[in-house]
Image: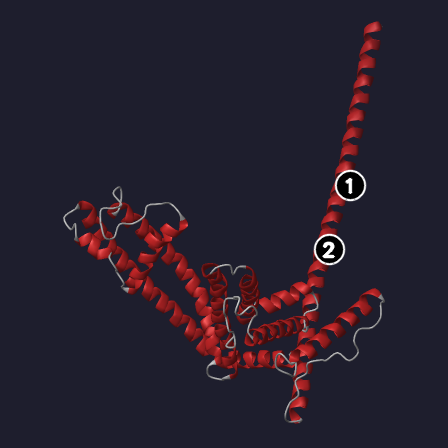
Amino acid sequence: MILFNFQLPTDKIPSIHWTEIVTIILVSSMLIEEIHCFVSMDNLSFPGKCFNYFRNLFKIMAIVGFILFYVGLVLRFTYTTTDEEFFAARIVMAIDLEIWWLRSLSFIIVVRFLGPHIVAIGKMLKDLAFFMCIIAIVMTGYGVASRAMAYYPNANRFNETGISTEFNGRDIFRQIAYPVYYLMYGEFGTELDDLDTNRDEAWSISTHVLLAVHMLFVNILLTNLLIAMFSKRFDQVYEDTQNIWHTQQYIFTREYYTRAPFFPPISLIYDMYYLCRLTFFNIRRVCFKKSADPRAKTFKMIPINKSCVKDWYQFEGASTYEYAHQEVKASKAVLMTSSNGSDSRCIEKREDSNDSVNDSNNNIRQIQDDLAKLNQSFEDIKGQLKTLIE
């Protein structure tokens, strides 16, 4: 981005400068190299590659940088009727340049004592996002309330600092969000001057009290809360510095392995060859059911000392044996639980069937007894009828 010679096309200069062409080729080569790194990841599925790729903050910054670059490039050739319109492309390119400078922080990973600080910054950004939600609510509340008391219903009460009362995004940001935000840094601007010109008015006194409470809450309570959150995050990272450094070292080495052996734009030739070869073998494997690329590279860590290989194999064997042993124990526990459950269910079913048989036998006996009693009653009635007839 340092080579970018950004000028408005005119009749005297109808074409772009050669440094601009070099920059376009360089950024395009970097984009193709990022695509190469994406498809070379170990994840087999596309969602897995996306999850593994975009969980890295620097990768997200690179994608945003590429998007802004090409958006600015389109604006640079299409939206250039006047100097005012040309500022749109200039602004996009300036923001893109800032992102690329921040993206260069990823090279600090190679420094042993500075690499973990990048992880600390990433964790602090999450805490800062939480803090910004709180501070936005507090500042919006004070901004709306103070402007409602000091500037309404007469918005032009102050001749020199009268504000616009139009309800649109620009005026809301300019009159409420912008001045209230700088109160956090102690920049009052005309905030106190407007109130001091009418110090005996009720709205002025109320706004003074509200400002004092706001400054107490924001500059003392919330600021110290943010400092405490940052301190806690840094202590957590500092306690695990060794593991973080080894992880970063592995990630850096793994990414170096997947990238081209040349720097952009020379790497464009290798990246195009690799992508074409990968596409050919994928079509060959999917459409024609043939084997994949037999010469595909495989990442493997090679130790400096040969004795380390034996230690690694022993460690892998012990870890695999322990994992398999735990899996067998877990499967046995599941089988025992299921067998005990099935046995208990069988016993319960057997007992239920025995109970039902006993109940049916008891019912049959009851019916037989009832039939015998009924038969005896018939016999008694017959005897009584015979006695009456005689």
Spatial CA span between label 2 and label 1: 22 Å
Residue 166, quarter of picture: top left
Residue 240 is at least partly visible in this image: no
Q: Quadrant of the C terminus?
A: top right
The circle drawn on residue 357 is 1
Vertical side of 3 occupied by 54: above or below:
above
Residue placed most toward the observer, 199 or 80? 80
Q: Earlier in the sequence, mark 2 or mark 1?
A: 2
Give the percent coordinates (x, y) of residue 29. 63, 74
Tell me what residue is drawn at x 44 percent, y 78 percent.
Answer: 238
Tell me what residue is drawn at x 69 percent, y 85 percent.
Answer: 313
Residue named by callout 2: 342
Judged from this view, the residue extending furthest toward the front is 12
Judged from this view, the residue extending furthest toward the left is 200
Give the percent coordinates (x, y) of residue 308. 64, 90
> In the drawing, does residue 91 fall left or right of residue 54?
left
Q: Residues within 10 Å of mark 1 (few under 14, many from 20)?
A: few
